Image (cartoon, rainbow, N blue to C red):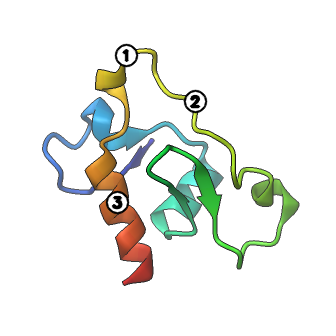
Amino acid sequence: MARIAPHAGPPDAVTNCLLLRADLRNLFDRHLLWLDDDFTVRVATSITDATYRHWDGRLLHLPLDPADWPDPESLRRHRAARCG
């Protein structure tokens, strides 16, 4: 499980977590994988391995209840951290 924001409210709140396999979590934590505002997965162009490139442009599978979706503001801050 990847935490979107390390200190945003309860650390394991469903809106602050993404269920990712270990290698994708590592990319997320290193800001080489992120989500756009519409929950599209993006992979840094520096990642050339086809194992990971195929995720770029795919939509995240979201919970049925929008109240359980990842927090958009935390995702924006995560994206901003990769650029900053």
Crowding near pointer 3: few (<14 within 10 Å), some, many (20+)?
some
Question: On the image, numbered disc 2 is attached to which residue?
Answer: 61
Residue at the spot of label 3 = 76
Is residue 60 or residue 4 the one in the foreground? 60
Disc number for residue 65:
1
Quadrant of the snapshot with the C terminus: bottom left
Left or right: 57, with 78 as reference point: right
Q: Residue at x 31, y 31 (%)?
A: 14
Q: Residue 64: horizontal and vertical position, in percent?
A: 45, 15
Under circle 2, the secondary element is: loop
Q: Amino acid at mark 1?
A: Asp
Q: Are marks 1 and 2 in contact (CB under 8 Å)?
A: no
Could you tell whether 70 is left or right of 53 in the image? left
Q: Is residue 10 above or below residue 3?
A: above
User: Is residue 11 or residue 72 the one in the foreground?
Assistant: 72
Amino acid type, mark 3:
Arg
Q: Is residue 20 above or below residue 27?
A: above
Residue plotted at (44% across, 50% down)? 37
